Image: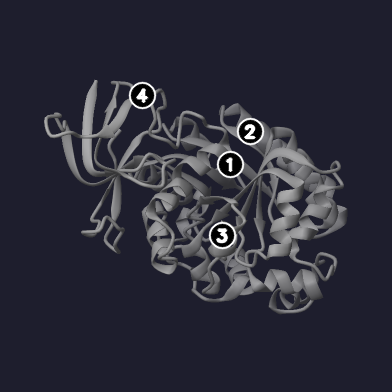
Amino acid sequence: MKRISASYVYTGKDIMPVVDGYVDYADDGTIISVGELSGTDCPGDRYEGIIAPGFVNAHCHLELSHLRGAFEKGTGMSGFINQINSLRDSKSREEKIRDASAWLEKLWNQGVSAMADISNCDDTFAMKSKSPMYTRTFLEVFGTEPEDCDAVMEGVRKLKAEADSYGIDAAPTPHACYTMSPQLLTAASAEALKSGFLSYHSQESPEEEELVISGTGALADNYKGRHLSTPPVTGKPALMYFLDRLSEVHRPPFDEHILLVHNVCLTQEAAEAATAALKNVYWAVCPLSNLFIHNALPPLGLMRENKLKIAIGTDSLSSNDTLDMVAEMYCISENFPDIPLGEIISWATSSGASFLKEAQLGEIAPGKKPGLVLIENIDGNGRLTADSCSKRII
């Protein structure tokens, strides 16, 4: 048995920390006990800062790591799409794999124990199969033209077969309403639901909302200018259009684990519709990415009022300067200072683990093996600072 202690221990479930806390764990990382040190207790290896469970990055595009620093900020979704189309293949496959591998290792060393990762190709399959980090890979599907639906689905099934050959958990998933024909959105959702998991970019930008509600705006003009089809105009929030397409797979409710990513433009109407239809819905926020592209943040007040299950992701290095879970948490704490740090840590740990159904992860509790992370450079009140950073202990 080994013991570590720190100024604060956050379990990933409890909002309040264990002050002057310790964690006992076995050689294989299994948690034995957690508690508060008494005056006569041996502190073991002592750290200044916060001990937390290993993080769960609920949304990442690891394969885009070669794009760090290449994108202009603040372009909105239309401008971002133009840049991704232009720059996605700006480096060789070898360079892409090199950069993605380096960031996967960095994420592990920063304390990420699990990740929901997006793939459009096979660049990251081998590295994920060898990594100690658990990953669930979502094979993202695009295609705006209805006549292309069958060919796109055939292609993603081949990609899944390749992922299966590496022994990683992977399945198709739909991308977003504006990159998919209605037929493809339903077909990809049906394939995703077979796996028990679905990840979907939802209400990421005002341009997306305007496109679906009224068929106007920068995103609509972008697609029409490229002679691409756009989703039907519904007059309702874009999330409700997604729910309508899901209902073509089977009637609600849906018991599968469904992750809605970004949620910048979430409304009360859409939140109520989603929670009524989706029994295991999780809501990933990627605040630094949202600021990078749109200079906007998700309505965390509304999300907390509705008791939504929130998780945290980093998105990609095409829309972020780093893949750093502590930086995401600091961004939230600075912009929403009333949210307790323990709640934010729970979003970065146990909530993501619950979405992935990884019961051993996300919580410091006897019998679990979440990995342990040290968060350093906190202030005198135990809050995160701009200099806060993390490193893996086990």
The residue beneath circle 3 is 88
Pointer 1 or 2: first along the chain: 1
The residue beneath circle 4 is 30
Amino acid type for the residue under numbered disc 4:
Thr
Q: Secondary structure at mark 1?
A: loop
Pointer 3 or 4: first along the chain: 4
Q: CA distance from mark 2 to mark 3?
A: 21 Å
Judge whether 93 appears above or below 338 on screen: above
Amino acid type for the residue under numbered disc 2:
Glu
Q: Quadrant of residue 211?
A: bottom right
Q: CA distance from mark 3 to mark 4?
A: 41 Å
- Relative image position of residue 154 (x, y in whole percent): 78, 41
Amino acid type for the residue under numbered disc 1:
Asp
Q: Secondary structure at mark 2?
A: helix
Pointer 1 or 3: first along the chain: 3
The label shown at residue 122 is 1
